[in-house]
Image (cartoon, rainbow, N blue to C red):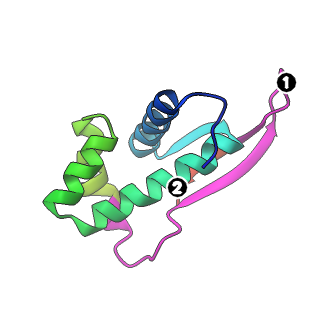
Amino acid sequence: MRKLGVDNKHRRSMLANLAISLIMNEKIETTEARAKETRRVVEKLITYGKNGSLVSRRKALAFLMNNKEATKKLFEVIAPRYKDRNGGYTRILKLDERRGDDALIVILELV
């Protein structure tokens, strides 16, 4: 797991916020390192959504910081879309380097 230059609580919160943004907007623009970590989280959340059990819903809700809107969209809109697909729910498209620190900027989107 990448540390992303922050402590554990900050990293978990940042990944949860990126996951919420990806679920709600279905496309986000971020750095490559953050996108790769967010991909791991979102793929697991979509798998929870495909399972659809109460335990899975509670796990997803807990990770998404009790964001009921995002959890509802995950379980009712996004997860059914991938019912016949075994993983690989996201795509990373590389854009350009950021001007200040040359960090590679990418688009993370749902397939």
Q: Residue at x 37, y 55 (%)?
A: 45
Could you say which is closer to the camera, residue 101 or residue 5? Answer: 5
Could you say which is closer to the camera, residue 65 or residue 108? Answer: 65
Could you say which is closer to the camera, residue 78 or residue 46? Answer: 46
Q: Is residue 91 left or right of residue 19?
A: right
Magenta range: 79-106
Q: Is residue 85 left or right of residue 100?
A: left
Q: Residues within 10 Å of mark 2 (few under 14, many from 20)?
A: some
Residue named by callout 1: 99
Q: Residue at x 58, y 48 (%)?
A: 37
Q: Are marks 2 and 1 in contact (CB under 8 Å)?
A: no
Residue 98 x, y percent position in the rendering = 80, 29
Marked residue nearer the N-terminal end (2 or 1): 2
Q: Residue at x 36, y 66 (%)?
A: 81
Residue named by callout 2: 40
Residue 28 x, y percent position in the rendering = 56, 39
Q: Residue at x 38, y 79 (%)?
A: 84
Q: Is residue 62 magenta?
A: no
Q: Is residue 93 left or right of residue 14?
A: right
Q: State the CA–CA distance, disc 2 to disc 1.
A: 27 Å
Residue 99 x, y percent position in the rendering = 84, 24
Give the farthest residue toward the front. 7
Q: Residues within 10 Å of mark 1 (few under 14, many from 20)?
A: few
Q: Amino acid at mark 1?
A: Arg
The quarter of the picture where residue 21 lies is: top left
Residue 88 x, y percent position in the rendering = 53, 68
Is 45 situated above or below 26? below
Could you say which is closer to the camera, residue 29 or residue 40? Answer: 40
The quarter of the picture where residue 20 lies is: top left
Is 105 situated above or below 5? below
